[in-house]
Image (cartoon, rainbow, N blue to C red):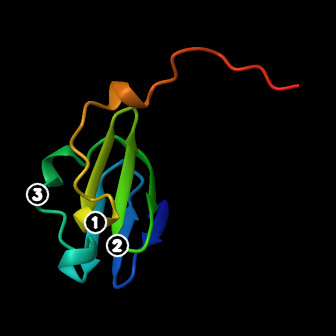
Amino acid sequence: VQSISFTYGSFAALKLDGSVITWGYPESGGDSSSVADQLTGVQSITANYGAFAAIKADGSVITWGNPSSGGGFTQDTSELEPDGIVTLQ
């Protein structure tokens, strides 16, 4: 196991091969069966109170868990890419 993330009642373990296993309260991400076929090539996982987000090697984002906590994100992730460079001074 490379890392473990948690929500309120659920855990997600990122394995060394980029796969993910989950357990715990189904409504807060413990049941990832709806996205299990997409949880390959994962580089990192983050979590909030009720959902998980996985970033894959190709830059795509997979979410699962409580939709009220962001677990139902199904939009094209290209919308998450910046439109330009911002300079901070």
Residue at 29 percent of width and 53 percent of height:
63
Quick check: 64 left or right of 52?
A: left
Q: Amino acid at mark 2?
A: Gly
Residue 65 visible in rendering = no
Residue under label 1, please give it.
68
In the structure shown, which secondary structural element does the residue marked by tag 3 occupy?
Answer: loop
Residue at 49 percent of width and 63 percent of height:
3
Residue toward you, 79 or 24:
79
Quick check: 88 left or right of 10?
A: right
Q: Determine crowd level at label 1: few under 14, some 14-19, many 20+ residues with C-alpha closer than 10 A.
A: few
Q: Amino acid at mark 1?
A: Ser
Residue toward you, 79 or 7:
79
Residue under label 3, please give it.
34
With respect to residue 78, does 56 lie above or below? Answer: below
In the structure shown, which secondary structural element does the residue marked by tag 2 occupy?
Answer: loop
Residue under label 2, please give it.
50
